[in-house]
Image (cartoon, grey):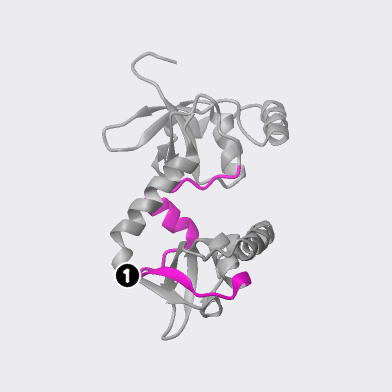
Amino acid sequence: MINITEHNQEIIKKFYEDNKDSIIELKPNKIKLVDKIHKEDKHVNYMAHKLANMMKEENKELDKVVVVRKINKIGYVLVSGLKWYYVAKSLKCNLKCIVIDSNLSHINFNGKYGIIDTSVKQPKDTEKYIHYSNLFLGRMQYCNPRKTKVQKKFETFNEGNGIDKAIAVKELSNGMYLIQDQYINYLWLKDKKERFIPIKIIKGDEK
């Protein structure tokens, strides 16, 4: 298994260091929520409000940085940092922002920089995560597992909110990964619209 939180924090820290000269301060009302994942995540709003109240009691200032993209002369769209956006809104304070030039959405931003964004449990045998676009199905795309088997597996995965084993793959010379086993597990992740796939790399005749 890998520590997803530490993995993401290292990437974000490097991104902030590389872009610290472009940080500006904005009022939260200048930032719009456009991505569906941001508009529908009410839980983050609730947790951020509680955090803001704690910061008020302890007289702490907000020093976190979010990522935004410019949409017009005076407007911006949030790309990453929903919790801190809501905290700033609750505290009624300015928010430090890194402005990116591209039209990257939250999902595409995570994909570009390798930030793992997953809502399901990680299999214990996971060696790394890859973006789904780097997974090559090969002969597996012609497999038709029994519907009863798929349904039973899906029910088990739904109950546990995660697959039991990482997707077994072979690493190809072009940077892609060829799926070797756990195809039903892959189908469940695809059904859940997971963009980052937990994999286990096999070598030679290993299975």
x and y, in percent, of residue 79 in the image: 47, 64
- Asked if the stretch drawn in magenta spans residue 93, the answer is yes
Residue 176 position in % (x across, y down): 34, 37
Q: Is residue 111 magenta?
A: yes
Judged from this view, the residue extending furthest toward the bottom is 73
- 113 or 187: nearer the viewer: 113
Residue 184 falls in image quadrant: top right
Q: Residue at x 30, y 38 (%)?
A: 175
Report x, y in % for residue 151: 71, 32
Q: Which residue is mark 1?
A: 22
Write down the region rendered in magenta: 90-119
Quarter occupied by residue 59: bottom right
Say if 200 sits above or below 33 in the image: above
Q: Is residue 24 above or below residue 190?
A: below
Amino acid residing under circle 1:
Ser
In the picture provided, is 188 more to the left or to the right than 22? right
Q: Residue at x 49, y 42 (%)?
A: 5
Q: Residue at x 41, y 86 (%)?
A: 73
For mark 1, give the secondary structure.
helix
**Depth order, front residue of 52/173:** 52
